[in-house]
Image (tube, rainbow, N blue to C red):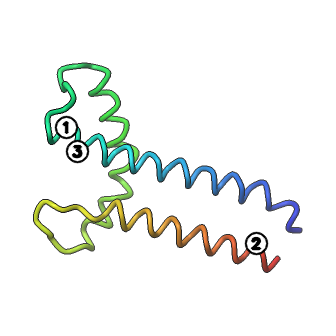
Amino acid sequence: MSLFFIPFVNLLFTILNLYIWVVISSIIYSWLVNFSVINMSNHFVVVIGDFLFRATDPVLDPIRRCLPELGGLDLSPLVLILLIHFFQEILKAVMVSL
């Protein structure tokens, strides 16, 4: 039974790891925009930002609503990454028990 689920769990791990990199890219992009490092009049930069916004904000918004206001500091990406790692550890434990 576990031989059937191993490829699916590996695929899920890969997707979660890629999503962590998307979240990290979103953080870096927001820093670059806030410090005026990148040119926002460039269409390619706007498309990248729109993709990152659409990929991360639906997941980060509920976390932002639960966290207290900390001024300009947004800890929701950190909480999301920790939750993803926690979920991955649960999956590892379940796979070992099978």
The residue drawn where x is 30% and y is 35% is 49
The residue drawn where x is 47% and y is 53% is 20
Q: Is residue 50 left or right of residue 7?
A: left
> Is the residue marked by circle 1 packed among few (<14), some (14-19), or many (20+) residues within 10 Å?
some
Q: Is residue 34 left or right of residue 86?
A: left
The residue drawn where x is 44% and y is 68% is 82
Contact between labelled residues 1 and 2, with CB atoms less than 8 Å apart: no
- 37 vs 91: above or below: above
Q: Amino acid at mark 1?
A: Val
Q: CA distance from mark 2 to mark 1?
A: 41 Å
Q: CA distance from mark 3 to mark 1?
A: 5 Å
Q: Amino acid at mark 3?
A: Trp
Disc 1 element: helix
Q: Which mark is residue 31?
A: 3
Q: Amino acid at mark 2?
A: Met
Tag 3 or tag 2, which sits nearer the N-term? 3
Contact between labelled residues 1 and 3, with CB atoms less than 8 Å apart: yes
Q: Nearer the viewer, mark 2 or mark 1?
A: 1
Residue placed under numbered mark 2 in the picture: 95
Q: Is residue 36 left or right of residue 81?
A: left
Disc 3 element: helix
Residue placed under numbered mark 1 in the picture: 33
**9 or 35: which is nearer to us?**
35
Q: Nearer the viewer, mark 2 or mark 3?
A: 3
> Is the residue marked by circle 2 packed among few (<14), some (14-19), or many (20+) residues within 10 Å?
some
Q: Position of residue 95 (x, y in %)?
A: 76, 72
